[in-house]
Amino acid sequence: MNFASDNWSGAHPAINESIARESAGMAAAYGASALDKAVEKRFDELFERKVAVFFVGTGTAANALAFASVNRPGGVVMCHREAHVIEDECGAPEFFTHGARMAPVDGADGKIDPLNLERELSRFKPDFVHAGQPMAVSISQPGEAGTLYSRSEVEAIAAITHARGLTLHMDGARFANALSATDMSPAEMTWKLGVDILSFGATKNGCWCAEAIVVFDPEKASQFPYIRKRGAQLFSKTRFVAAQLTAYLEDGLWLRLAAHSNRMADHLRDGLDASDNARQAWPTKSNEVFAIIGRTKAEALRAAGAVFYDWNVPHGMHEILREGEMLARLVTSWSTEQTDVEEFLRNLGTAD
Amino acid sequence: MNFASDNWSGAHPAINESIARESAGMAAAYGASALDKAVEKRFDELFERKVAVFFVGTGTAANALAFASVNRPGGVVMCHREAHVIEDECGAPEFFTHGARMAPVDGADGKIDPLNLERELSRFKPDFVHAGQPMAVSISQPGEAGTLYSRSEVEAIAAITHARGLTLHMDGARFANALSATDMSPAEMTWKLGVDILSFGATKNGCWCAEAIVVFDPEKASQFPYIRKRGAQLFSKTRFVAAQLTAYLEDGLWLRLAAHSNRMADHLRDGLDASDNARQAWPTKSNEVFAIIGRTKAEALRAAGAVFYDWNVPHGMHEILREGEMLARLVTSWSTEQTDVEEFLRNLGTAD
Amino acid sequence: MNFASDNWSGAHPAINESIARESAGMAAAYGASALDKAVEKRFDELFERKVAVFFVGTGTAANALAFASVNRPGGVVMCHREAHVIEDECGAPEFFTHGARMAPVDGADGKIDPLNLERELSRFKPDFVHAGQPMAVSISQPGEAGTLYSRSEVEAIAAITHARGLTLHMDGARFANALSATDMSPAEMTWKLGVDILSFGATKNGCWCAEAIVVFDPEKASQFPYIRKRGAQLFSKTRFVAAQLTAYLEDGLWLRLAAHSNRMADHLRDGLDASDNARQAWPTKSNEVFAIIGRTKAEALRAAGAVFYDWNVPHGMHEILREGEMLARLVTSWSTEQTDVEEFLRNLGTAD
Amino acid sequence: MNFASDNWSGAHPAINESIARESAGMAAAYGASALDKAVEKRFDELFERKVAVFFVGTGTAANALAFASVNRPGGVVMCHREAHVIEDECGAPEFFTHGARMAPVDGADGKIDPLNLERELSRFKPDFVHAGQPMAVSISQPGEAGTLYSRSEVEAIAAITHARGLTLHMDGARFANALSATDMSPAEMTWKLGVDILSFGATKNGCWCAEAIVVFDPEKASQFPYIRKRGAQLFSKTRFVAAQLTAYLEDGLWLRLAAHSNRMADHLRDGLDASDNARQAWPTKSNEVFAIIGRTKAEALRAAGAVFYDWNVPHGMHEILREGEMLARLVTSWSTEQTDVEEFLRNLGTAD
């Protein structure tokens, strides 16, 4: 009954097999091997256009270096107030950009409200140097609140972003889960809606350590090799990342794993809805579920072996908790077993 | 009728005389002259304790280097959502701290609400590395909204700050105006209430270029000389800053200038209250006044020669403006003449 | 005949098996799993004392974060003029330390000359803020020139380093090769000689991606978790690094692999000494060999399938090349086969 | 007999008068006043072309922000091994560029040797990301060694610099002294020889605090306003810098002051040449003189009231000092009196 995080899962056997298969012989280091090049081409196909793709080691690196690549002095990145880049990356985005500000934009359901985005941006007057200068807007798909931006929501944000000459970044740490929860293709979810740079995560969904930054206009990535190396993110044996991604993208493995993960989350959501002892804090899609549970019940669940995190209540939502309740985050993964979900729900019960 | 900013004022004759007087002969550079030392001692007297004081060139430098001196990796500074360090320093605080985050805390009247501060800080769990680590709380006295923290408000914030081992910083860009608007002494407004570091501003109030960072526990300032030099803020001919401050602090000049400035603002406030063509956006003290004026009237005032800035409406307060109105900031200074205020109010009129 | 770099080798089967074995089930992320803890303990045993150890993804990260952990404003790290941290890390050490300077110290054979070190350090006068402040001395063992510091050489450098209160860092990207080329134990080569922090590399010697920073005084590492996370080097699934290191350190695998690699380099060295068509540029130990070869011969070797890099001639040594000659670096690895060396030497020949 | 530094001098009366004159009334802050604009135009005339000019507070800021404006990830600035930007700015250039490396180039007389420059640059292969990427070459005119680059020397360096698409920066902290020691005009000494950015110093030569960055191609300065503000170098009351520069540049005051200063140094040089008790360490022009003096004699001079600094012997020149000797730097300034020089030389004597 472990719903701590999809980061707690291991690697899918197909990933390990690919790593082992690619381990023999010499291959050019630092991204120059045939395998690296083949995977880069695979990304072109996946996104239905020529892209520039850069492997890095962590999702935090992907986000931080993406911002670094569009950095401006006094730069400002607009993101949701509870965005992962603000709350969970220990200042890496600010660090790698030498102090760009992650400016919080309010919005329900963990998503930027376009009206608030417009308002925040309008605070910046041209040539008013004191306020700094916006450089990017960043959205998570799905977000840390487990919700998804709709097609039209991304389009609205992209329109505002591009009207000011800014870059639209998408944090896709759980990109496969987002795709799997919608009917969109990788291209449809990204550049066709106006996304300029994608942090493409594979680690959480069955890899060991495989993150990539996808720049949809390769001409804008000319300095990226230096940014990555200076950022200590250029692996020497990059083929081991490439080996993971080869297997990950082969025959739709990545989407099958994400679909499983989402399905397990659906079970959890259904169970919460059916229970009198807990409720969803807000409706989610993908593989993160937020549950409001009485503290006593939560302790009982943990005593029975359930693992999950207490979660900070989003800004301005403190009223969702009644006295004695807590907010729990439940995450499923590619390796979550249905019996685990069932056992959890059984322990949760339908009424105390 | 120039109410653009106290930065638009020049320097008081006494300041210029002191500069000219101290210009003769050789004196040790980089802060080692007898005059520098004498002014340092003057700060000890002013604050009724041994302090460490460092001259810098701008208020932005004072704030940014103050944070740099208490920096931690992944550091977070709590400040009001409309704080100068967030909105008006082009990312300098983040830059000089290599990416510390200026975390916005909501609160009415441009002041941190202690309850919200407590809530924000409680989001940081010990050893939860992902969120980063709070390092300081920063308040402005007076703030950009022209309001003042009361004695008990500062004490409440200091208690929360110190309970977590953090540093309390006060942005005193208009410190003299704050003192003059209350009955507190420099010591009473700062370390006696729990302030650890003060950005002491003199430029706006009659100097040319004289800002100082006052560290109330000198033992915590051992690395500051290197931080300042690396930050390109160690003037070679520091005696010219010292010369300004000598005159500034002599015989209470600084407080007289601030009192005048505040008094001019009082006139403005009274005039706004008496007018049907404008109103105070919120009550202020010190030398900043925020007025809601109809756009047509504002244009007429400007056509008549009045100078003032449009101001961004604080977050969550958009409803204060009715259709066709704008928010104006009116700042008085040591050199504002009463006739200017009167002319402005006459032009404003009492009813259209 | 591939002597491009040990980075071009893949991973040893035992490493892959361990990764596969550890891939099942859920395990705490971000370094908190049982396996992570077990490997940390393994480092205590290896170094015969309690150490703090932090896994990171690249050798560049290991060095850069090591410096960041002892950073001072205006900090200066003394290192050899051809040190990897100067020449081959794209400014990462400077970047992660917000601009600490990597100060070049001259010395023969790619090693810091203690006399020059003393001289460089004596340029820094106490409290003379303009010059900045030394914070560390960094040596590579073995260095990029393939040479090794002797016991007494490290002791001499450590004495100078510690006399000034500085930290001694050892870049051990090829630490196993260094150990294998001497009779020293891990403890004897490091803290027993005065080394304070070690970059422990395993990637080049049979792992995929396994680097660690070893801090010999764990009390000095309290901020390191934040430094690593802010630096985007905290892997979520750290157990995959731990899995590599478990196998790497088991039953002396790492030393056997390094011994093989060094032996292959010995063959190369012997062959060069015996050939009239090339000569060693300087005597090396460990697994890097530097050969001076005529350009025509070098082209012929490459045409025959040999892979190796042109190498920059060290500062002040341009006279080692005669007209028409080039400097080649030949690196062996755990996977180099003796037949490859033999074929290379056969192609090199004994006389043209 | 104070030859410590031209930084120890005060301000010329004409500077003070100008400051006092410009102190009345309101004027737009942050560089937008009429006076600011007039001085900017004055720089156009001075350099015989349209330039972009930015006032800052210190010479260190001028250099550091100049580099920041041409920064690249992994950037490298080539400068002389004893350059001020390496030895005397506490890492500010590295700090403001987020870790660009100041790469030392050897050369006699404190000047970059073009051959060595070429050699250093040739170490950087296109697209070899590990080494970083050169971005600028920086020369000082005059340099910290008191020597001057000739016209052809600058041209040679500019040719190498521009052949690689790099920026040529000139540190002109004592620019007036350089001009005064040659027959070149400001334009001839800078952009006509290929200089792209100039740090124009006025502080040492009779101002209080007046430094400027001159960008000869204004189109390359579009981000500079943000770089300066983020760097905390945008003074609010910029008119006080403008007031200094107005007087400084009026009627050739600056060149007269520098000529005096250089003349005083000539006296010192002549005196040293005539004395048996000291000798010039190397021939200088401009207002810095380097003398080798016996330690006993140096102490006697100091006992008699002479003030001067011990100076670090340049790299590779330790043999210039015989046993018991020290290297002294003697700096003259606009306010040095001939009687001071004479008294110093009398105390030095012609033979012991």
Image (cartoon, coloured by chain):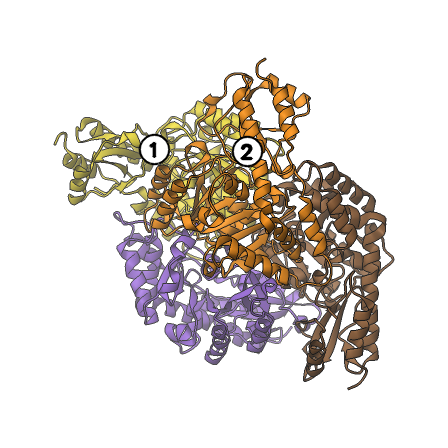
Chain colours: A orange, B yellow, C brown, D purple
Q: Which quadrant of the figure contains the C terminus of chain A?
A: top right
Mark 2, chain letter? Answer: A
* Numbered label attached to residue A288: 2
The x, y position of residue A182, in whole percent, is 48, 40
Residue C91 visible in image: no
Measure the alpha-carbon separation of dots 2 and 1: 44 Å
Residue annotated with mark 1? B146
The x, y position of residue C224, in whole percent, is 65, 43
Kind of residue at badge 1: Gly
* Numbered label attached to residue D94: none
Closer to the camera in the image, B11 or C222: C222
Residue B89 visible in image: yes
Q: Is residue A76 above or below residue B348?
A: below
Whether residue C57 sits left or right of residue D114 in the image: it is: right
Which is closer to the viewer, label 2 or label 1? Answer: 2
Kind of residue at badge 2: Glu
